[in-house]
Amino acid sequence: MAFQDLIDDFNRDGYVMLENAISPEAVQRLCQNLDQWTEESRQFDGPYGETIDHRPRFDVQPHVHSKDNPALRRVASPVEISDDFWAVAQDNAALDLTAAIFSPNIKFYASKVNSKLPGSKTEVKYHQDFPFDPHTNMDMMTVLIFLDDVTMENGPLQLVPGSHKGPLHSLWQGGKFTGAVADDIEQEAIKHSVACTGKAGDACLMHSAVLHGSSANLGQDPRRLFIVTYVAEDAQPFVPNPIPTIYDGTIVRGKETGQVRSVPFQMDLPEHPKTASFFGQQEGQ
Ligand SMILES: O=C(O)CCC(=O)C(=O)O
């Protein structure tokens, strides 16, 4: 598809699929790192490791993860512990497309791996990313790089096309920060969702206001994503980064302008996570 068609699709739908966003060699390198981390996870029976804000870097699925059935579900800021991940975050075709869509000046904000191993039961309740990470403007892109083929069986990302043009939904329910939208909004979202499937190396570029979630991996193969958040250089954060990293703010395309650009919006402020990842918040911990 021509570059301009990808941009037009993104502007209409709030997301676009990009084939071969990273090379097969890069996929292989990232998977080797991840295979090693998954092996290591067998030694632990709960979240472990440490990020720069002293929360666990590695998160496992409660009641499922064990030595014999590793269910590593999240690696926070893998770019800090693997040069392979940092190299991909700084240079990939989805980043080029992000720069073409939002601004020639783009900074790196955060990264994570979401891993759904077969039988792991990991699922993601519906939410928008922006209310977790509000910035002065909404030019924030979540790039989900597929490290495995993503099929209808292994728990693909499900998203609502066009929802980036709609309201910002609260992630607070009944006075508690749940990191998820209300049940009625989720039920409606499920009815209008499309699944993002594709080959290892492809990427889904998703606007930070798109409503999305995903269900458990019911297949026999893993579904692992390297998820990178990029923001326009003139978007300044309102809250501390929920996945803090030494690389936050690194200019990955273009240059620093020292500008701030603001757009009007209203939303509930998020609660900073206390658990290893937002999975804990969604589970009410
Ligand atoms: O892993 C997925 O399917 C969705 C990821 C996501 O929404 C998140 O981590 O915020």
Image (cartoon, rainbow, N blue to C red):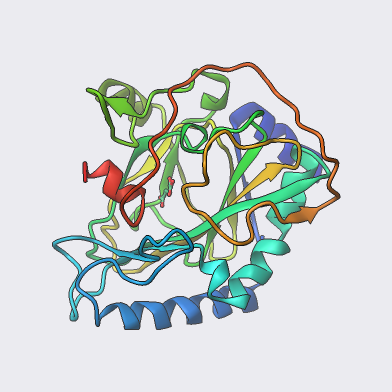
Q: Is residue 190 left or right of residue 175?
A: right
Residue at (32%, 27%) from the top-left corner?
172
Q: Is residue 60 left or right of residue 104?
A: left
**Where residue 25 appears, x then y in whole percent?**
63, 79
Is 70 in front, or is 273? Answer: 273
**Where residue 256 appears, x then y in whole percent?**
83, 47
Residue at (52%, 34%) from the top-left corner?
130
Q: Is residue 81 visible?
A: yes
Residue at (24%, 63%) from the top-left corner?
120
**Where residue 127 appears, x then y in whole percent?**
40, 34
Q: Residue furthest left?
A: 63
Residue 5 position (above or below residue 262):
below
Residue at (28%, 66%) from the top-left corner?
47
**Where residue 76 appears, x then y in whole percent?**
45, 61
Q: Quadrant of residue 140?
A: top right
Is 253 in front, or is 158? Answer: 253
Please give the count of numbered marks on the rendered protein. 0
Is 197 in front, or is 253? Answer: 253
Residue 257 position (above or below residue 81):
above
Is 269 in front, or is 165? Answer: 269
Q: Is residue 208 left or right of residue 185?
A: right
Residue 101 position (above or below residue 246):
above
Q: Is residue 1 visible?
A: no
Q: Is residue 146 left or right of residue 100?
A: left
